[in-house]
Amino acid sequence: DAGITQSPRHKVTETGTPVTLRCHQTENHRYMYWYRQDPGHGLRLIHYSYGVKDTDKGEVSDGYSVSRSKTEDFLLTLESATSSQTSVYFCAATGANTEAFFGQGTRLTVV
Amino acid sequence: AQSVTQLDSHVSVSEGTPVLLRCNYSSSYSPSLFWYVQHPNKGLQLLLKYTSAATLVKGINGFEAEFKKSETSFHLTKPSAHMSDAAEYFCVVKVANAGGTSYGKLTFGQGTILTVHP
């Protein structure tokens, strides 16, 4: 959607393993976000970025880290995956005066 | 700080009757406000947006919303529901004119599931 690509789209991993999700955008948006979506909780912000190498924590950042070394890429890392991190993850990007554009989501299952 | 409250977790209507999904927001700065829709197992689609222009905003599929600053509300309406409107709807606030690192931060409401009965 509007140049936002998430990879992988589906992943099953074991508890304790590291996992990295990638978000790539082609529109040069300044701001990028990672959310997780769980039933009954809507979308909750994990981390966001307001520029290259500039990131900040969201409301559910524990157990997650991010990096943004280029405008177009925003990586989300689970250092040691836990079952509570089983979720659907959405990446988004936006400019200062535009709506947010979302990726198609990544379904992560931690077993 | 900013927050969004969607006042109903579930709304049920009959086909052909009006839809009202309620959203209240809190923001220290002038907000941009959005409504997104998500159909089952799908991504998020923008319905409409308010970015400090006209307070009555028209969106896709016959939806509209009115920004009321005095009531800090941005309720979503549609005159006549269609079966295809059944989905989950999210109200989203974005701080538009803030300084500091909160600029551009998007905050979602909890979502409202709309059910449409034949």
Image (cartoon, coloured by chain):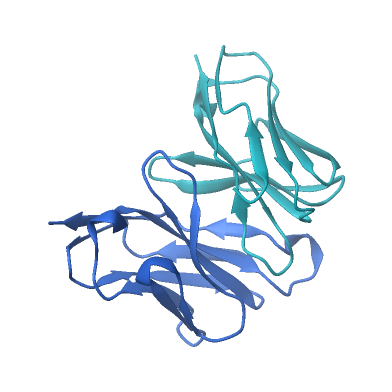
A105 or A62, nearer to the observer = A105
Residue furthest to the left in view is B118
Closest to the observer, B92 or A98: A98
Q: Residue at x 66, y 19 (%)?
A: A80
User: In the image, is B63 to the left or to the right of A54?
Assistant: left
Left or right of B60: which side holds B96? right
Instruction: Evaluate whether residue B97 shows in this view.
Output: yes
Total marks in image: 0
Q: In this view, does B98 lie above or below B110?
A: below
Answer yes or no: is residue A62 visible.
no
Q: Which chain is blue?
A: B
Picture quarter with the N terminus of chain B? bottom right
From the viewer's perspective, tell me whether residue A45 is left or right of residue B12: right
Residue B8: where, in percent of width, then height? 31, 62
Residue B104 appears in which quarter of the rendering?
bottom right
Query: In cyan, which chain?
Result: A
> Relative to residue B86, is residue B41 depicted above or below?
above
Q: Which residue is drawn at 24% across and 71% down?
A: B80
Looking at the rendered image, the quarter that the C terminus of chain B falls into is: bottom left
Residue B50 placement (x, y as % from top left): 55, 75
Query: Splitting the image into 4 quarters, where does residue B30 fall?
Result: bottom right
Q: Which of A4 and B74 is in front in this view?
A: A4
Q: Position of residue A102 (x, y in %)?
A: 59, 48
Q: Where is residue A88 in the image (x, y as percent from the top left)?
A: 51, 34
Residue at screen point 73% across, 39% down = A24
B31 in relation to A37, above or below: below
Residue drawn at the location 75% of the way across and 47% of the way down: A26
